[in-house]
Amino acid sequence: MNHHSRILRILPLTVLAALSACDAQEPTVPGAVHRAEVEASLSWEGVPSPASSAPSSFTLAPEVTEAPGFDVSVENFHFATSDMFAVTSPPGGLFAPIPADIEPFTEPLLAEGFFLGTRFRDDDDNVIGFGLEQEVLNLQTARGVTTYTINLPGRGTLMVRQDEDVQFLLDEVDDMVASNELVRSYEPSLDTLNSVPGTGRVIGGTGEFAGAFGIVREFGSLHEINLATGVHDLEVHLQVLLVTTE
């Protein structure tokens, strides 16, 4: 007889019954159900896009804003081509390497990889942090899985992920190649929603973002495609509907 069996033999039946009841119950974390309800209620309805001329004040759904113990806010981040300090991908990628002598991804495992280091700006165009975009892009399906790590000194680090659809960009490039057009400019800019709806999520954070959750979407503003240089004039806008604990 093993030691565990001997202990069970001498325990009172009432204790054994209590232990059995505990074992039959799923473990719960205080607030977990409430958090799941708040997360399920998050929606972009009523939230203007970063490029919108709508007023900055707006009203979120009551079930989101009236959740006790949680603080809900909208965070906007953006960067332009001029903010990028590192870009690399496999040789022959659509984007020119930055700097020119940065190591490309030559390993077969990284054949669909894309990496970008950039400064991040706020709505007033002030530099507020820096971070990385990391993407695995399937050119056959024009779909990518993207993560952003955004470091905001004095606040913390925020990490988000999404599925991304780049079909619009590939279509533009294909059309340019077919018409022997090396440079194509857009006035006004070509604005797109890059995120596959429903896929953008906050997945982690530090500092004031520790324990945060929420939803994410990415917009692109394309001003110029330059196939001759591979340096394109564009802006990327990340919008986060962020929930933190009070």
Image (cartoon, helix red, strand yellow):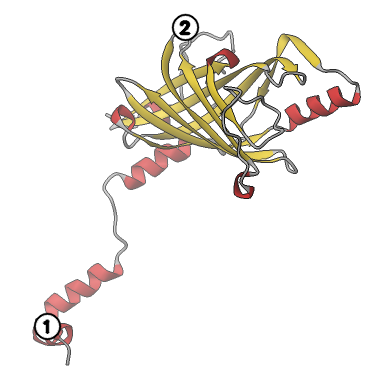
- Amino acid type, label 1: Ile
**Residue under the point 43% across and 34% down:** 159
Q: Residues within 10 Å of mark 1 (few under 14, many from 20)?
A: few
Q: Which residue is mark 1?
A: 7
Q: Residue furthest bottom?
A: 1
The answer to whether the residue labelled 2 contacts the one labelled 1, judged by CB atoms less than 8 Å apart, is: no
Percent position of residue 207, x then y: 29, 29
**Quadrant of image for the N terminus:** bottom left
- The picture places residue 177, in percent across and down from the top left corner, at 86, 25
Rendering quarter of residue 236 = top right
Whether 84 is drawn above or below 33: the answer is above
Q: Is residue 43 visible?
A: no
- Which residue is most to the front? 101
Distance between mark 2 and mark 1 Cα atoms? 68 Å
- For the residue pair 103 and 164, the one nearer the viewer reads as 103
* Badge 2 element: loop
Question: In the rendered image, which quarter is residue 137 located in?
Answer: top right
Where is 226 relative to 165, above or below?
A: above
Q: Secondary structure at mark 1?
A: helix
Residue 190 screen position, x and y as percent: 72, 16
Mark 2 or mark 1, earlier in chain:
1
- Along the horizontal axis of the image, is 118 left or right of 23? right
Answer yes or no: is residue 240 visible: yes
Give me the residue at 17% from left, 88% from top. Answer: 2
Residue 110 pos. (x, y %): 60, 44
Amino acid at pointer 2: Asp
Q: Is 232 left, or right, of 125 in this rendering? A: right
Q: Which residue is nearer to you in this view: 2 or 214?
A: 2
On residue 43, the disc is none
Q: Nearer the viewer, residue 11 or 129?
A: 129
Q: Residues within 10 Å of mark 2 (few under 14, many from 20)?
A: few
Q: Which mark, by number, is residue 124?
A: 2
